[in-house]
Amino acid sequence: MPSPEDDAARESTPHIDQQDTPEGACYLVLGPWTAAGLTIRPAWEALASQLKALPAEASGGTTLWDLRQMEQLDHLGAQVLWDHWGRQWPQKLEVLAPHRTVLDRVAEFSADRPEPPAPGLRQAFFTLGEGVLQVAGHGVDLLALVGRLALNLVKLARNPREGPWRDLSGHLYHIGATALPITALVGFLIGVVLAYLISQQLRQFGADAFIVNILGISLIRELGPVLAAILIAGRSGSAITAQIGVMRVTEELDAMRVMGIAHSYRLVMPRALALAIVMPLISVWTTISALLGGMLAADLVMGVTPAFFIDALPEAVDAANLTLATAKSVVFGVLIALIGCHFGLRVKPNTESLGQGTTASVVTSITVVILVDALFAVLFKSVGT
């Protein structure tokens, strides 16, 4: 026989007692049907086994469900009962008014709702229009940021003593100096890979010497600046957005506005100037590393000596290509800084928006870099060729 302690433990856990009456089976729902009682593992396992053992017709026919002796009922307990009943009311149910209210609420929100209709042409048109408006909004904000940057540069030229030079020097170090190892490594490996792949094709035609021309024009004019810009966009562009976004979350931007400090002057301009100065230098650094990697691979694979490589490079690549690459790098740097600041200033004061803004900043920066590089290739196709 169960001990008094077992009976007390049973009464303190949710359970169902079955009774046979002249009218049919009666199920007494007893105990606290609450989150506190149902989340206890032994109690839940025992209740689940009991519910599973009930006959299929337990929720209908002559079966009576008596909930009047239930101690407590919350939405979790009501959901368990509602799911067991097959999400429909039993034909015979005795329940107190407060418990009935909870069951009604669960039944209302658990009812099968019709699926929304498939999006048609009208909805697709509205979605497209919403996307166009969002892109236009970003474009207007970026254009305003460019205008404020131009005005701030004029202000700085008129009164250079009050310029944010300390911020500028800090950004030069964090964006430029700390990026040298990774850009050198990636550039060197890209040069090795390109030289190895190109050598496989040139060797078939006996044109080993032309590897200098191909590596020179591709690395100096295109791959060097673009590769450096992509690395800086992923490394520093995301950092810019995160820094300004954290200032939004911690309400530092609001404090600056109250103090009368312009965001564009203290936050945007130093970063834009730093990237405009640093990007050409990093581009040259990455290009040199890539050329060294290509020169080493050409020597090992094709026997093109470093001396021949260095002598033939100035003749193979016109100096105008280096000028074009430097100009592109300046534009890349300013765009990366503006896009990073733009998405940072648009961050809302919550961590979810901060993550979304940082991701959007990196993706947009890399996309804009590639688009602008394609534009440069089309407009200046006759330069250096």
Image (spheres, rainbow, N blue to C red):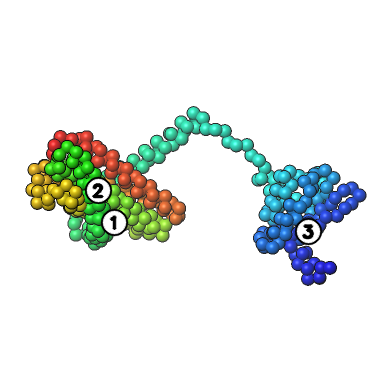
Q: Which residue is mark 3?
A: 30
Tell us which disc is closer to us: 2 or 3: 2
Tell us which disc is closer to us: 2 or 1: 2
Q: Is residue 206 left or right of residue 95?
A: left
Residue 219: % across, % down: 20, 45
Q: Is residue 304 left or right of residue 68?
A: left
Q: Judge the density around disc 2: few (<14), some (14-19), many (≥20) Cα neighbours within 10 Å.
A: some
Q: Which residue is mark 2?
A: 193
Point out the image quarter for the C terminus: top left
Give the label on residue 174, or none.
none
Local secondary structure at mark 3:
strand
Q: CA distance from mark 2 to mark 3?
A: 74 Å
Kindly identify the amino acid type of the residue bearing the numbered disc 3: Leu
Q: Is residue 213 visible?
A: no
Q: Judge the density around disc 1: few (<14), some (14-19), many (≥20) Cα neighbours within 10 Å.
A: some
- Outermost residue, right direction? 22
Q: Is residue 51 left or right of residue 120?
A: right
Tell us which disc is closer to us: 1 or 3: 3
Q: Which residue is mark 1?
A: 266
Residue at x 85% of width, y 50% of height: 25
